[in-house]
Image (cartoon, rainbow, N blue to C red):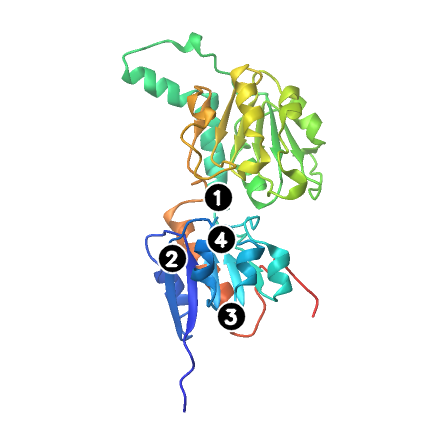
Amino acid sequence: MAENPRLKIVIINANYPNYEAEKEELSSFPVDITHINTSWNSEDIIPAVRLADAILVRETPLNAEVIQTMEKCKVIVRYGVGVDNIDLSAARDKKIFVANVPDYGSEEVADHAVALMFAVARRVVTRDRDVRKGRWNVGDQEPVFSFNGKTLGVVGFGRIGQTFCRKVSGLGFGRILVNDPFAQEQKDSIELVDLETLCREADIISLHAPLMKENYHLIDSGKLTLMKPNTVLINTSRGGLIDENALTEALLQKQIFGAGIDVFETEPPNLDNPLFNLDNVVVTDHTGWYSRESLQDLQKKAAREIVRVLSGDTPKSWVNRWED
């Protein structure tokens, strides 16, 4: 009796410490799991994925050109929530399932947003730098505003946005404004408002919306002009939600107080990114989602989507649905 052919599982540019979680989840199938490092150029990605039966990917773009060359692929799983790097229509045309992992790292991303909020508002980075240089008691030169009684604005009120609000609920904010077309009003908790109102009235603005064509550069020069001089803008969602050139100009002109940025439109960002030269910006390397626990959770849940497809089922988090 012939043995079942081994299936090729390709992991692209994940660069995790190991892939034992994936191997464990897929152990009941005859699979070979290979991690491949490539550039983000289609001509380098195509040879890596052409004969793959399933693909796991982080931010590497899988465009229509790449997907059309896939000869055997049954499922593409995004390590994470956003799937803007995958051409969903091209995958749908080839009946390739695309799945994501929406239910991991919510606590970590919300924690990171809180950390950036404090770092910017309390000027933690510049204070650390100055103390190391022997400068002391210079707080008046860098004014700091209290959160107490201020207005919090949250753009995107899904799992992470709600978790963020829960974490900051004890900080004394007077109001919480939410902009999300799918959110529901909560008595004595949040106020649903349009984005312009939120930008005008909020002192802290934290972005937790997914990136789509409709909200690319959601925060542009016009929205930044509406904000207060003491506004702190936090982005732990997607870099494309903010027009970085407009943000740089607003920060230079002191139109807003500061920004905490974990995500960039181009990642990794170029070293000459003008945001890096500003003292009122705190930046991190798209690690808001990360903890050792959340990484294990992510790897297991991503691999389980492949298990479902190889078992003849559909993914739990199937994002490019089609009608049979």
Residue 86 or 179: which is nearer the viewer?
86
Gap in angstroms between the C-alphas marked 4 and 2: 14 Å
Gap in angstroms between the C-alphas marked 3 and 4: 18 Å
State whether residue 167 is above or below residue 86: above
- Residue 89 picture location, percent across and down: 64, 57
Q: Which mark is residue 107?
A: 1
Q: Which residue is mark 2?
A: 36
Q: Which residue is mark 3?
A: 72
Gap in angstroms between the C-alphas marked 3 and 1: 36 Å
- Amino acid found under the numbered disc labelled 4: Ser
- Amino acid found under the numbered disc labelled 3: Lys
Q: Nearer the viewer, mark 4 or mark 1?
A: 4
Residue at image position (62%, 39%) is: 156
Residue 40 or 15: which is nearer the viewer?
40
- Residue 257 picture location, percent across and down: 53, 18
**CB atoms of marks 4 and 1 within 8 Å:** no
Q: Is residue 316 visible?
A: no
- Residue 244 picture location, percent across and down: 54, 29
Q: Which residue is mark 4?
A: 42
- Residue 123 picture location, percent across and down: 43, 20
State whether residue 74 is above or below residue 214: below
Quarter of the figure with residue 268: top left
Q: Is residue 156 left or right of residue 284?
A: right
Gap in angstroms between the C-alphas marked 2 and 1: 30 Å
Q: Local crowd at mark 3 within 10 Å, few (<14), some, or many (≥20)?
A: some
Q: Is residue 219 visible?
A: yes
Q: Earlier in the sequence, mark 4 or mark 1?
A: 4
Residue 180 or 67: which is nearer the viewer?
67
How many numbered circles are shown? 4
